[in-house]
Every structure is written in C-alpha cells, then in structure tokens.
Image: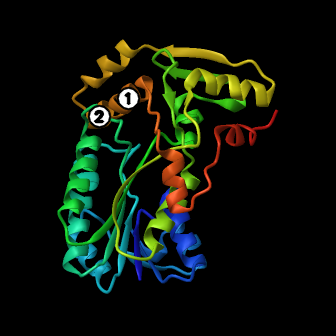
C-alpha cells in the first residue's frame, strides 16, 4: 500500500489518482479525514482516506502502519503563517520519514526543490534536512528536485497574468529557468513510487528547454496575440525583502532571488527519459491560453 501525504494539493492529488489508476492500494493522509470536501475526489478515485496531521505524531504513526511506500508532496507554502514552515516542512516531514522507517516502509518518494536554489531560507533548510535524513535511512528513496512550476511562477498569483496581458518580472528577466509543469512532477512521483528494483536516487527535474522570463513573455505574446505590459521587481528589492524576520517573507524572497538568477536544469531530458515522463513544453502551456 502507498501512503500519500499532501494528497489534497495539486501534485499530491494527481499522484494519488494516478497510483489508483495503476491498480495500487492508496492511503491518503488528510487533515480532517474523509469528511473534508477535498477528500471526495480521492475517495472517488479509489483511495482510502485517513485523518492525520504532520504536527500530530500519533496520527502519522497510525497512517504508516502496513505501508510499503510513502509519497510526501506536502508543504505549508504559500500560506505558511507563523512557524508553519518549521512545524510542517521541517519537523513534520522529518517525523514522517522516521515513522515510515520505523513502520518498515520500503520506499520513500519526497518532493524537494531544485539543487540550484541555494539562497538560505526556512524552506530550503527544511528540504535539505529531509534529503539528508532519507540518505541516512535504511529505506529506498527518490528525492525529486523540481525547478519552478510554470503554473505557479507564470500564474496570476505571482503577477504573471496572461488573461490580462501583464507580467511581473523578477530581476532583469534574462536568466533562463527550466519551468516544469506540476502535472509532469506528479508523473515523476508516480514513476518513482512504482519503478521496480531497489533505488536510492536524487533527481533534478525541469522542463524540456530553459527559457528566460522575458522569453516567456514573448512566447505568450505570440500565442495570445496581445502585447504584455511588464513590470520589474529589482533584485535589490528582493534582497531587502529577504531581510524580513518573517519566515514566509524571507522564504518567498529567497525563492524569488534564485528565480531571478536562473535555474537551468541541464539534465532535465535525461531525467525524464529515465523515469518515462513526457515533458510538457512552455509553448504547449502557453497555447492553452485564449487569444
């Protein structure tokens, strides 16, 4: 049986449903359990839903009983208020790894972040600490290190609003980024959870071609037939935000600084080939927006 933690999120939900489609027995850890509205689609897909919370160790221990593999896609971002990054992404995820090992799980699949993201932050520290914990465990593991999600960083919540032909550019916009679709990340998760044979692997994943922010704007202008208005957030402004004592603000600034500096995943195609994933191009993503 596979335990999916983060199954009410975009990537976790897709992975849970894909595992069910492959005939796997799936248990989804959901805060609030089967009564939560977000659990309905998981139940309809064939997953069993158990009530649990990464900040409640006893519930995590119960969820890990009889589990063969664990998939962890959970993060408190982007709504990580207070000490949520410490409690969930760090302490909670570490507790899940240790409980999975105690329960005898064979494999652990963990969503981290790109190895090119080196600017220190609460999220970066949590992710790298969990990677180290898995590397020192007895379990098989696959650590997936995705680049920036195209649905997020080229979405309206972060100022790239294709529907209204406007784009927020972080830094000068010239450094290249291997934007990856969350759907492709879910495909990597499913492949990692189901691949035969022993595996202990850390995989850098990204889209099929690195593209700069400004090139992304030009691509969307070409597919929508509309001229975009562009605003720049200077690197100095991001560095000032990075000095914030608030963990969420510091983390977002750290991610934005690394984004501005670029994240070209050179081995993206090779990783996709190894895991049998067909990568979605940024052009294909842009083509989905109405003209």
Query: What's the residue at 46%, 72% (across, down)?
Result: 195
Tag 1–tag 2 contact (CB < 8 Å): yes
Residue found 68% across the figure and 31% down from its top = 162
Asked whether 57 or 225 is in front, the reply is: 225
> Residue 37's x, y, as percent?
53, 67
Q: Quadrant of the N terminus?
A: bottom left
Q: Pointer 2: residues within 10 angstroms few (<14), some, or many (20+)?
A: some
In the rendered image, residue 185, in percent from the top left (x then y), is placed at 51, 54
Please give left or right for residue 206 compared with residue 103 in the image: right
In the visual, does 106 lie left or right of 214? left
Q: Which residue in the rendered view is the most extreme toward the bottom?
A: 66
Say if 209 sits above or below 107 in the image. above
Question: For the point 27% across and 73% down, which residue is it?
Answer: 60
The quadrant of the rendering that contains the C terminus is top right
> Of label 1 and label 2, which has the lower sequence position?
2
Q: Is residue 191 above or below residue 242?
A: below
Number of on-image labels: 2
The reply, left or right, for residue 263 in relation to residue 110 is right
Mark 2 highlights which residue?
118
Relative to 131, residue 169 above or below: above
Horizontal and vertical percent for residue 227? Answer: 74, 18
What's the distance in space between the residues labelled 1 and 2, CA to CA? 7 Å
Dot 1: what SS? helix
Colour setup of the view: rainbow
Would residue 8 be seen by someone viewing this image from the given angle?
Answer: no
Residue 150 percent coordinates (x, y): 56, 40
User: In the drawing, what numbered circle is on residue 101?
Assistant: none
Q: Which residue is mark 1?
A: 258
- Residue 33 sits in quarter: bottom left
């Amino acid at each position: 049986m596979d335990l999916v933690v983060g199954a009410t999120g975009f990537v976790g939900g897709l992975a849970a449903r894909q595992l069910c489609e492959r005939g796997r027995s799936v248990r989804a850890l959901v805060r609030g359990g089967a009564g939560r509205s977000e659990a309905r689609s998981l139940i309809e897909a064939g997953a069993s839903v158990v009530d649990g919370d990464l900040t409640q160790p006893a519930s995590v221990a119960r969820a890990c009983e009889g589990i063969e593999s664990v998939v962890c896609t959970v993060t408190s971002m982007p709504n990580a208020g207070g000490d949520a990054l410490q409690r969930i992404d760090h302490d909670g995820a570490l507790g899940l790894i240790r409980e999975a090992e105690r329960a005898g799980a064979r494999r652990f699949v963990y969503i981290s972040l790109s190895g090119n993201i080196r600017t220190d932050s609460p999220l970066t520290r949590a992710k790298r600490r969990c990677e180290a914990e898995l590397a020192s465990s007895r379990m098989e593991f696959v650590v997936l290190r995705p680049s920036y999600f195209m649905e997020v960083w080229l979405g309206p919540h972060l100022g790239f609003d294709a529907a209204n032909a406007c784009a927020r550019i972080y830094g000068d916009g010239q450094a290249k980024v291997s934007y990856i679709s969350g759907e492709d990340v879910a495909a990597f998760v499913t492949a990692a959870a189901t691949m035969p044979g022993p595996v202990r692997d850390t995989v850098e994943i990204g889209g099929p071609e690195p593209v700069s922010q400004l090139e992304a704007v030009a691509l969307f202008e070409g597919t929508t037939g509309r001229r975009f208005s562009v605003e720049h957030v200077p690197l100095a402004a991001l560095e000032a935000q990075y000095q914030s004592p608030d963990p969420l603000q510091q983390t977002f600034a750290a991610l934005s600084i690394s984004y501005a500096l670029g994240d070209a995943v050179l081995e993206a195609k090779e990783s996709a080939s190894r895991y049998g994933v067909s990568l979605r191009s940024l052009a294909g993503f842009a083509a989905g927006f109405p003209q």
